[in-house]
Each structure stands twice: as C-alpha cells, then as structure tokens.
Image (cartoon, coloured by chain):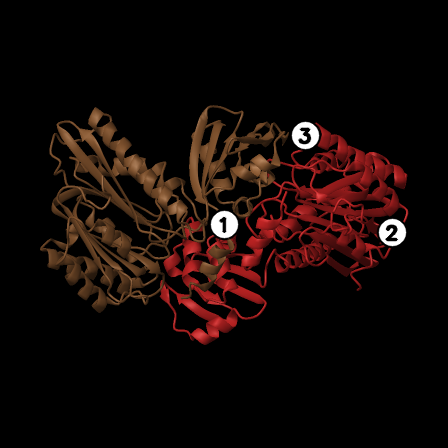
Chain colours: A red, B brown
C-alpha cells in the first residue's frame, strides 16, 4: 500500500510558517473526521516540553480528534509562557477545525529554550486546517523534520474480523535519540476499531520493543512522544481485549509499524552511514539482554569502530562487560554478520577479510550469544561519524 | 618539586621493546629498594584483563616491591594463555630484580584480544631492570602511553610528623575513560609511613572523588587500575589510622595528587580541545549530585556543543532532566563560567557574547545549582570533537 495514503477518515497537511529559517515546512496537522480512541507514551526525562503536559491533560478522557505539531522550536524550558502557548496551539487548531480544544493533542520539536512565535503558528494552523487531504500524510511527515534527512512514513494493511484495517505512522528523529519509555516524535493513525480502554496498553507494548530499543546518541529528549489515534472507521466489532485474536493481530501489526519507523530513525541517525542491529541471545533474563544490547548500542567506541569499518570486537566485549550485571563475558560469543570473531574468552579463528566485509555494507549486525539462559533482546542504532560531531557542534542556539 | 623525582628509595625506567609498531617506549618498571605497603583499585568492568587477576593475587598480603607495565597490548580476552603470560611478566621482573614474583604487580594497556609478545617483553624487562634510576619517573610515564599525547606525572611534598614526605604519581589514559570504581592506569608512589592496613581505604577514598569522577567517552576499560605503593622511607611513626592528624594529611595530599592526575587525563582526552569542569551544587544528596554531573559529562550533545563554542544550555538542562531521579529541573540554575544562562525553568537574561566567551578558552566550567539541598559533586570531562571520531575510527585492530 502507498505509505502516503492515510487510513479511512483521516486527513493531514503541512505548511511552512517561517519558524524554520530555512523556509522548510514546519507545521503539520493530523485530523480524523470522527473522534478517536487515543493514547500517548512520553519521555521519561524529568524535563518535559510544555506540549507534553497539555497533551496529557487532553488525553484524560482517552479521546482525541486532531494533532498539531510544529518543528523548529521545542517549547521546552519556557515556563508559564510555554504552557500558555501550547494551550493556545490546541485552541487555535480546535477553532479552525470546529473541535473542542481538549480533543486536540500538541507536539513540538526543535530548539529548547525559545518561545513559540505564536503569530506565525496561528497563521500556519489556519492555512493547514483549510487544506487537509487524505493524501497529505507525506507532507505532514515533512513538516515535523528537524535534522532528519528524509521523511519517515510507514503503512500496513491487515485483516480484521469482517474486513481490512490500516495502520499508518510517521515519525521524526535523528539526534537526541535514546529511549527509556518513549523517544522522538511518532504519530500512528489507524481505522481499526480499538477501544479507549486498550489504546494505551497496546501502544506501550508496541513501543517497548521498538522505539524503546533505539539509540542514536544516548541523549534523551524532553519532547519525545508517540501517539496513537484509532478512529474505528474500518468497522467491525470493537477490540477491547489484548488477548483476543483481533487484539493480538492488531498488537502485532502495530509492533511491526513501530519497528519499521524505529528502523528509519536509526538509518537516518545524525551523520550515520550504517544501520546497526544488535542482537543479544542466551541471556539470563530479558532485562539483562536489553541492558547489554543498550550498552553496546551506546558505546561511542563500538560505533566509531564500525564507522571506520574496523572489526574491533574487543570494544564490543568490553561494552558487554561494562553493562552486564550477572553475565560472564568470558563465556560469550560475538558474531559480526555471520563471522564468529570472539568465542569463549578469546579471539576466534576468522579471516580478517571476511570480518571487514561484514562491516562494509550499509547494514551491520552484531550478534552476542551468552551462555546464561534463553532470554534475548534486539536494539537498533547507527554508526558514529565525524559528521555527527559536525552537525552538533554547528547546530547553534 | 620536580615531578620527575621519585620519592626516597624508588627507582624507575622504561624502554621500547618493539611491541608498539611506532617504536615508542612501551615497557616501564617502578621499583622500591624496600618492600612497600600496597593497594590497588580496579575497573568494575566484568571483563578484566589478565594483569588485574595476577595483581589481585599478588596483593593478598598487601605488600609489593615493584610494578611492571606494558603498553600496546592489553592482554585482555586472552584466556588461559593470557593468565600465563601475565604471571610470566611478574616472574621475569622478579628474577631480574631479585624479588619474589608475588611482590611484583602487573599492568597492561592497549589493544584487547591480542597475546603478549613475550620474547620482546622479556628482553625489555631485563633491559629496564638493569637501568632503573631515581630520575626515571618521566621515562616510566612515557612507557605507559597509548593514545595519550603527553606523559602525565604529578608530585607533591608535604609535612609529616618529624619530616617531609613525597607522593609521586603517573597515569595514562585518553580514551575508553569512564569511571565506576577505577579508571585508566595510575601508579602512585610515596615514601610516607603508611601501614598495610590503611593503604587500600586511603586509596579508595582518594579515587572516589577524582579518577571516579572523570569521563572522556563513557566507555569503561577492562584494564583500569590505580595502584599505591608506600615504602615508608620518609621515616616517622607508622600511619595506621585514617582519622589521625597524619592520616588526614596524607589522605588530603593523596586526593590532591589523584585530582591533578585525573585533570591531566581529561585535558588530554582523545581529540579534546577543552577541559570541562562540571560542578553540581544544591543537590538532595551526593549520589544525586554525582549522577547529574556524570549525566552532563557523558552527554555527546553537551560535549559537541562546547566543541563548537555554542552556549546551548538547553542540552545541559535536558541531560540534567534525563539523569535526575528526584531533582526538579525547572528549579535549577545553570551557569557557563560566570554567566547565568538558565534560571528557574526559563532562559536567563544574558549576553550571547559573554556566554560565547565563557566557552572560548581551553577550560570551561558548567555550574548547575539545584534548589533541593546542600550536597554537591564535581566531575571532569573534555569536549567532543571530530578528531575523537577520527582517532577511534582509525585505531585499527
């Protein structure tokens, strides 16, 4: 299916308000013809942007009908004025779309510490609200980009009792990417008949093994939010149990969409040339597997070695040893692609040429097998290049 | 005092064995004419180099008389052969110096996963053992360098009951620097009359607020070790209590030497152009202060901003929010040098020119004041430049 097409009953659009000096699109709206079951998962950073507080308030009834997102200014560290501005963004959007303000969710991404230029944003909201379209998904994805080099959209159709439903998602994020609960901005729309009562648990579960296992630079943003809006226009019986057949099908489809979006973020990490998949198997429990995978995924030394095409497995085993709490690194095996490079405490017999080849493409897999148990975890990250430093030393306030 | 002069009764030396392809010095020996009270603090990485196991064994009696250190090969991930090689290093050194093997401590630093070229090392040990000198401290410091650009030596004289004593220390480290218990290699020699019983507690306490509050890249090495050898040749009553006047004077002098060595490591961090001092005050307790200071010190985004001379305080407040567990980031103040840039949840009134000036020199101070309590912590790090990536993408196995 064309990822540009939104699920039934949704419309989207974007415009350039002038908040971004580049003149690129910086304001997007997602809208449903009918009210949706809605949920959001947010950053665990104790510093939170004003939009997150407003969105939380507006989600108390677990319903929403539109989302307004601006890029360029994160509206974080902006105190009472920031809260007023975020509320005003919701109010203006509601006014233009004839909704109640608390049916509008808000997100902001960009520089921390600056106030929203509300006049520009108000003009933009009115303009976008008047031009929303069922084909506007890609435009909306462009309107939320910051240092992203490509817009990130994923769509998936799947069978539900009595018909087909669609899940569509867009996200942004290239730096300041590190998960605890949620990370980056992600927006997921579906016409599946999801009950309010399961919108949040189903989203939490999908995020846990996708967006929450993704890091670019270890820095956790105060703006990170993933939202799910389900308008139920696919019809069919309402799904109100996660353990029903339909509930499981939806959970799996949602996990797949979130996973594909997370992969797009890792691939477009600031300065990245390679997507890195980290797979830890044979761990004592999933928490230990995840801790080790995250430790490897956040190691600057591992990521610079891969940028340099260097099969420096010693750095991988060292990161494993740094982050393990019960695992014995001397009983681990490490593979780069298919090449076994470390085996039970010492260097394996391997060809340097084959190990270098395993790092040569634009996708690299690091597989760490432990001798502790049966738990596993996957993590996504990217290599770490001089370009990352250049981007972030030059991204001036 | 000339940092090249060792305390009474110590001799040192180094040579180039050919382990380093560059032909630079790569084997150092520290030696005392008489047995010393000795202690070591080691990495918390669950992966440990063979030298660390051998040193631990040899320290069971809390005594030692010599240390042999090689650079270029870390002797880590080398299994049983690595253990044999590390023991052999101690045995060869003991033989050349007419000591018992278990009075020799061992350290190795360099590439992980390669075996020690023992023939070269044996030749080097014999050569250095025959040419040890009271003026050999600086040579020894050169022999332990890897990506360090300068040798790192500190010396301090201080009063003890009935005379003067000296503490001399050398260390190495520029990358893979991140503390838990200990970090990098550090060797501290003193002629002060320290009892075996307090050698370890006094070293632990000095390391806690110095080497343990230092990060270059967040990666914890499997070789990190700090050793203290006290030969008591300054004379005077044995110091066997930390809470005695002499015990406190020694503790303070040792802390000062460790602090000065840690600062040399941060200043010489791989690719670094600036030493960054992070000071957190007003915290609820020291653990929270340390956690926040470490969080800021390990933020790639904070460190690239400082490399770029950009007063991007939003990244500092975001790192604070990411790592705080009880602190409210909205009630914090952030200063760059003397310039207040963030105050109680919003941007402070400040001149961009003055904020940029605060980042212009080769030393930068970030001061974060919290409104929670009276605890504080300091941390040392360095800026993060493209050169770091270049060094670590090109440091091939």
Q: Badge 3 is on which residue?
A: A79
Chain where mark 3 sits = A
User: Residue placed farthest to the left in the image?
Assistant: B98
Which residue is labeled 1 in the image? Answer: B384
Per the image, label 1 sits on a secondary structure element best described as loop
**Disc ID at residue A160:** none
Left or right of residue B238, residue A109 in this image? right
Q: How crowded is mark 3: few (under 14 residues within 10 Å), some or many (20 or more)?
A: some
Local SS, label 2: loop
Distance (Cα) linking label 3 and label 2: 36 Å
Residue A130 location (% of width, % of height): 90, 46
Instruction: Report how far apart the C-alphas of labels 2 and 1 lie in the structure.
Output: 48 Å
Q: Verify CB contact (< 8 Å) between mark 1 and mark 3.
A: no
Label ID, residue A9 = 2
State the CA–CA distance, disc 1 to disc 3: 30 Å
Between tags 3 and 2, which lies in front?
3
């Amino acid at each position: 299916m064309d990822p540009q097409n939104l699920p039934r009953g949704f419309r989207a659009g974007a415009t350039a308000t002038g908040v971004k000096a580049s003149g690129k699109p910086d304001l997007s709206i997602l809208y449903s013809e009918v009210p949706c079951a809605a949920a959001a998962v947010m950053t665990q950073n104790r510093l939170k942007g004003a939009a997150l507080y407003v969105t939380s308030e507006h989600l108390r009834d677990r319903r929403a009908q539109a989302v307004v997102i601006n890029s360029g200014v994160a509206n974080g560290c902006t105190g009472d004025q920031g809260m007023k501005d975020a509320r005003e963004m919701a109010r203006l959007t509601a006014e233009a779309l004839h909704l109640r303000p608390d049916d509008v969710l808000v997100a902001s991404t960009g520089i921390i510490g600056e106030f929203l230029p509300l006049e520009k944003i108000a003009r933009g909201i009115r303009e976008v609200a008047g031009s929303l379209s069922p084909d506007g998904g890609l435009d909306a994805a462009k309107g939320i980009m910051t240092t992203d080099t490509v817009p990130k959209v994923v769509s998936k159709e799947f069978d539900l009792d009595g018909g087909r439903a669609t899940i569509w998602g867009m996200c942004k994020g290239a730096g300041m990417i590190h998960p605890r609960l949620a990370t980056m901005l992600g927006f997921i729309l579906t016409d599946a008949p999801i009950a309010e009562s399961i919108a949040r648990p189903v989203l939490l579960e999908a995020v846990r093994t996708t967006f929450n296992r993704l890091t670019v630079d270890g820095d956790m943003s105060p703006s990170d939010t993933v939202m799910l809006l389900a308008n139920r226009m696919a019809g069919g019986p309402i799904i109100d149990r996660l353990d029903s057949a339909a509930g499981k099908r939806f959970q799996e489809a949602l996990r797949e969409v979130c996973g594909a979006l997370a992969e797009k973020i890792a691939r477009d990490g600031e300065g990245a040339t390679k997507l890195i998949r980290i797979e830890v198997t044979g761990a004592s429990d999933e928490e230990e597997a995840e801790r080790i995978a995250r430790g490897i995924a956040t190691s600057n030394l591992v990521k610079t070695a891969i940028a340099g095409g260097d099969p420096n497995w010693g750095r991988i085993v060292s990161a494993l040893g740094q982050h393990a709490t019960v695992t014995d690194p001397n009983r681990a095996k490490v593979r780069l692609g298919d090449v076994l490079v470390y085996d039970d405490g010492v260097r394996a017999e391997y060809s340097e040429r084959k190990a270098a080849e395993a790092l040569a493409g634009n996708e690299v897999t690091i597989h760490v097998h432990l001798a502790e148990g049966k738990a596993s975890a996957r993590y996504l990250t990217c290599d770490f290049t001089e370009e990352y430093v250049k981007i972030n030393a030059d991204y001036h306030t």
